[in-house]
Amino acid sequence: MDNMTKAVISRIKNGLALKKLLLIVLCVAGAAGIAVALNSTKEGLVEYIGAQKDIFTSGKALSVVTLEDLAGRKGLYAMGPIEGLDGEITIFDSKPYITKVRGSDYILDTTYKHGAFFLVWTEQSNWKDVPVPAAVKGYLDLQKFVRTEAAAAGLDVTKPFPFLLAGTPVEIKWHINVDRTGGKPITNELFVKSKEPFVARNEPVDIIGFYSEHHSGIFLSQYAPAIRKDSGMQNAIHIHLVSRTSKAAGHIDDITLGEKMVLRLPKLK
């Protein structure tokens, strides 16, 4: 083999090696780019991005994540408010239920084409069913029951975790965010005002919840309407409903449980 031929072969090999190296670099950069784009935090059994309290600092409810970044994930359960105080995000087993107030009614959309100013989610496929006793009737009862049963199931209750609830509550008071700020910077008062209330009675539902004792103002409200401010009790759950019989989906403010409801907790491997 002459020197010229050897030189050509060497260049070809070097070119292939360079292409392979570039491909690896692009793949790594692409993966890193996804992580940076989400800029989310993983803690316990949940992942979250953004914080409710940030809107009071900035005065705006700007998007920090698009749901399309989460599309395609299996066993996805998520919730949060839509950017601009324009609705509620609830994702149940990878299916979005997006509600927005329009006029005197609300609409339901089932696409991922929405942004959130904070979002909390989990990816869970295995759940353990726990019957809810008749003594568990209200919001605080549910909060205490979730913690007790989660601890009994071996979950670390000092870290955030998801839970589900299925059945037919006697009553659910819930809301959808709707911008009533009049273009003014968002304050606590305007945020409370920017909610359209609804009531569901004796309606079969699936409920998604996230429990935490350390994320107030992040993906949990500091106060819940169901908890008196002078009670000394801390809100530790964020819960959304998805109706099985109507288009109702959104944030639960208060709940009266019905008979034979079932709590579902992540099943540890």
Image (tube, rainbow, N blue to C red):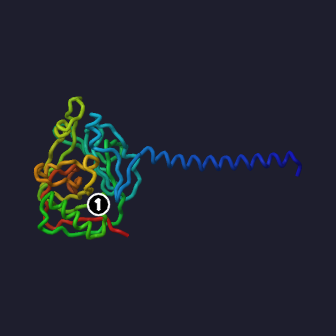
- Name which quarter of the figure residue 244 lies in: bottom left
Foreground pick, 197 / 214 = 214
Foreground pick, 246 / 17 = 17
Farthest top residue in view: 183
Report x, y in % for residue 160: 30, 57
At 40% from the left edge and 55% from the top edge, which residue is drawn?
73
Farthest right residue in view: 2
Foreground pick, 56 / 97 = 56
**Tag 1 residue:** 158
Q: Quadrant of the C terminus?
A: bottom left
Q: Secondary structure at mark 1?
A: loop
Report x, y in % for residue 68: 39, 46
Q: Is residue 247 visible?
A: no
At 33% from the left edge and 68% from the top edge, which residue is drawn?
267
Image-based side of 140 in relation to 39, left or right: left
Q: Is residue 137 visible?
A: yes
Report x, y in % for residue 15: 71, 46
Report x, y in % for residue 174: 17, 49
Image-based side of 97 in relation to 15, left or right: left
Establish if 169 lies above or below 51. below
